[in-house]
Amino acid sequence: MNNAELAARDLRALWHPCTQMKDHERIPPIPIRRGQGVWLEDFDGNRYIDGISSWWVNLFGHSNPHIARRIKRQVDQLEHVILAGFTHQPVVELSEQLIDITPVGLDRCFFAENGSSAVEIALKMSFHYWKNQGQPEKTVFVNLSNSYHGETLGALSVGDVDLYKRTYEPLLLRPETVPSPDCYQREPGVNWREHSELEFAHMEAILARRTNQICAVIVEPLVQCAGYMRMYDPVYLSLLREACDRYQVHLIADECAVGFGRTGTLFACEQAQVSPDFLCLAKGLTGGFLPLSAVLTTNRVYDAFYDDYPSLRAFLHSHSYTGNPLACAAALATLELFKQSDVLGANRQLAGIMAQVTEHFRDHPNIAEVRQCGMILAIEMIKDKRTRTPYPWQERRGQKVYRHGLQNQALLRPLGDVVYFMPPYVIQPTEIEHLAKVAWQGIQLATND
């Protein structure tokens, strides 16, 4: 088997996610034979550093032996069982451990298979809570501009990235959208904290105006990942938590992408010392091995559904593979790896190296900003640095960086014209240096015509 043979078979049978399939007439899909650590290897023997953790899911490297062993042991005990009326040891242990490590006050776990599903659960729980509390008029969600929360219809409704949302607009809920505290938009001389504080006025205004109709505010803490890796200061979360309490509105923190150490703390909410009413987790939860997501919430929310069956107050939401034992085993092994060493401390050193090797990017005439939050670093290409005029999106400058990366042992899949690093935590300094070198070359190629 070689790349060409498997790619040809692929294109006769598959429809790939987030892809205009006609692109594969020019750029065939790359068949991956194996993965080890940060490296992926195709059938022709070419190797690629996975600079984006395979869509942000991989924390401790491909084929991590500790996680693999835990899954193999679980396979011989129990592969799956219905979680309605039944339970099993891995899901109980995982629930206990998640409650222990997440912000205080999150005392109940509800499981699904992916981030979009977790967001759907949080939205439904919030609405249903208010209904059970005798406030059925609270049906409105508030989101941030440029936000992304997934592709299912409810999750898509509370996102705001036009590329994904516009086509399906007639099918969607209508949230109240307020300007993001995105610090890329700050005025000269204004720092991140000041800008984020100023932008909160928009949120305060909508909460004051529609408090009786709003059931929840949903945000991605600190980094709007699919929204071109735009970032903001933790003070916004502090202000938001206080306002949600004051106006009696739920706070949903979508940490599907930023949880488990990506931003420098185990959970991004910790940097503002806040606890949301709902915390959505996915992606890194299983270390990139198996699909699993979780929604953590409070006993106060849980108690609003707890009643005799005829009251019809129960949360009758389900997924066939809810709390799958194999996925839970992978998640438990992932959490064990955090306990076995100072992962966050090591990440701080790696993040420092990422900053050092990209420092010179800031002087490039077509780079508007290099921004970083922990193990997430983004480089925004732009047509005119002085006026911050972007390139026309139709030119697809980022794709040129992507193609250059593939030719030079690097998987870098830009978001539009934003090149970013979000690697597994086992990456070595020399490998970070290689990603930076290839990214620089790719940006030079992408901006020189």
Image: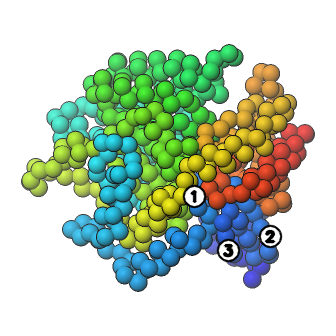
Residue 320 in the image: x percent, y percent? 35, 67
Residue type pointed to by label 1: Leu
Dot 2 alpha-carbon crowd within 10 angstroms: few under 14, some 14 to 19, many 20 or more = some
Q: Nearer the viewer, mark 2 or mark 1?
A: 1
Residue 46 is tagged as 2
Dot 3 alpha-carbon crowd within 10 angstroms: few under 14, some 14 to 19, many 20 or more = some
Q: Nearer the viewer, mark 3 or mark 1?
A: 1
State yes or no: discs 2 and 3 in contact (Cβ < 8 Å): no
Q: Which residue is mark 1?
A: 59
Q: Secondary structure at mark 1?
A: loop
Q: Residue at x 56, y 23 (%)?
A: 193
Residue 195 in the image: x percent, y percent? 57, 20
Residue 430 is left or right of residue 118, and the answer is right
Camera-side residue of 372 and 22:
372
Point out the tag, 2 or 1, that comes first from the N-terminus.
2
Q: CA distance from mark 2 to mark 1?
A: 22 Å
Quadrant into which the C terminus falls: top right
Residue 393 is left or right of residue 115, and the answer is right
Residue type pointed to by label 3: Arg
Q: CA distance from mark 3 to mark 1?
A: 17 Å
Residue type pointed to by label 2: Asn
Q: Is residue 317 above or below residue 269?
A: below
Q: Secondary structure at mark 3?
A: strand
Q: Is residue 394 visible?
A: no
Q: Which residue is mark 3?
A: 34
Q: Residue at x 80, y 70 (%)?
A: 46
| Quadrant position of residue 17 | bottom right
Q: Is residue 448 visible?
A: yes
Point out the tag, 3 or 1, that comes first from the N-terminus.
3
Q: Residue at x 63, y 57 (%)?
A: 424
| Quadrant position of residue 242 | top left
